[in-house]
Amino acid sequence: MLKLSFLSGILLGFASAAALAAPDGAKLYAQNCAACHGEAGNGGIGIPLSLPSFHATVDDDYLRQTIRLGRPGRVMPAFSQLKHDEVEAIIRHLRSWYQGKPPIYSAAPVKGDVKRGQSLFEKHCAGCHGANGEGGHGTGVTFSRPRDFPIMPPALHNPGFLASAKDALIKTTLAKGRAGTPMVAFGQRGFSDRDLNDVVAFVRSFERAPLAGSATILETDSAILSMDSPHDLKTTVENIKLAIGNNNFVFIREQKLESGLVPEGQEAPAEHIVYFCNFGLLNQALATDPRVGLFLPCRITVVEREGKVKMLVANPKRLSRIFNNSELNEMCDQVTNMYKSIMEEAAL
């Protein structure tokens, strides 16, 4: 009896140690997911994850693969840095919002008529998910999405989604819909089993025809664009102000770089920053991805070191990579060229 008690104590100690060592799913979710999906999983930039209708139609493997692969070019990054047990802990936390049992799907492909499925998709799905399954434009933030969409329709023509969702999961979602979102239950709207299979076959066919640029993130070597000025600091700043107007921007203000960061009068005299804006471009940028606001208004920093003046500006092309949003690519490229044009003109 004493031996059994002693053994039980050891086993209990091991169990307690394992529990203490297990990753905290709630904490990991708060660190990696809550900013987009909401602290309680009610959505925001990302889709809501706490809906019972979501949990009832997605299996654990879908969650696992989605965390690992993300959605290239569609805001959701790939969390490849998370360890296996950390991913599992996040999944357990997500499932704590659901009282039922999650589904388990077969990996067997669904067989259907792709051409017929395309016709059904164009009629019933393209209005939300896009003509080519590219998903809605913008993010889930109110300003950037159409007012009649409470959430942004996800991209189905995306390598991250297609690698994460089994055919059976797509079919079940089509049949049952997602209560609490615009996704209706087509199984209750006259879709036959054949109809469901054909749409799934069409969606799966996206793997054979990737959308050009839809999952492309701009590549860039430097986070900072810099250019030397042949003029002194004061002349360079004045030249920048003129160049701003010539490039359809509005001058906002000029100040010493350290203004507000150190006591007044103690700012470094040879470090200035010039703020400016193009309000039409600003509106377009925020409508594409409101997170761009973190980097606005536009600004160029001018510093003088040992008689040499340099102009520096954050490289807009980095935004596409930081935000994992391929919709920003063209705009980031455009603003990068504008910044270069302003600095080149100021250096004349």
Image (cartoon, rainbow, N blue to C red):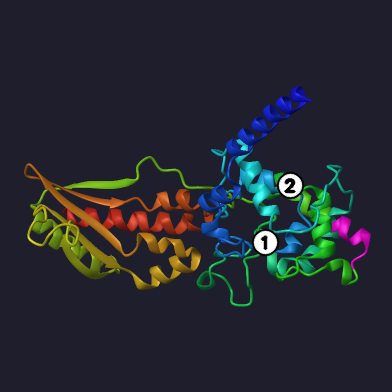
Extreme residue toward the bottom, this view: 148
Q: Nearer the viewer, residue 324 or 335?
A: 324
Residue under label 2: 60
Within the magenta stretch, is there residue 197? Answer: yes
Which residue lies at the image location 69% right of the left edge and 64% below the top edge? 129
Which residue lies at the image location 7% right of the left edge and 41% below the top edge? 306
Magenta segment main secondary structure: helix
Which residue lies at the image location 71% right of the left edge and 25% below the top edge? 6
Residue 338's x, y, as percent? 32, 58
Q: Nearer the viewer, residue 118 or 191?
A: 191
Above or below, 222 against 345 in this view is above
Q: Secondary structure at mark 1?
A: loop
Residue 100 placement, left or right of 21: right
Residue 218's x, y, as percent? 47, 47
Magenta residues (range): 191-199
Judge whether residue 89 can be spotted in this image.
yes
Within the magenta stretch, is there residue 312? Answer: no
**Amino acid at the residue labelled 1:** Ser
Q: CA distance from mark 1 to mark 2?
A: 14 Å
Q: Nearer the viewer, residue 23 or 205?
A: 23
Above or below, 243 against 29 in this view is below
Residue under label 1: 50
**Amino acid at the residue labelled 2:** Asp
Q: Residues within 10 Å of mark 2 (few under 14, many from 20)?
A: some
Residue 290 numbered mark, or none? none
Extreme residue toward the top, this view: 3
Q: Residues within 10 Å of mark 1 (few under 14, many from 20)?
A: some
> Which image quadrant for residue 57?
bottom right
Classify the position of the N terminus by image quarter. Answer: top right
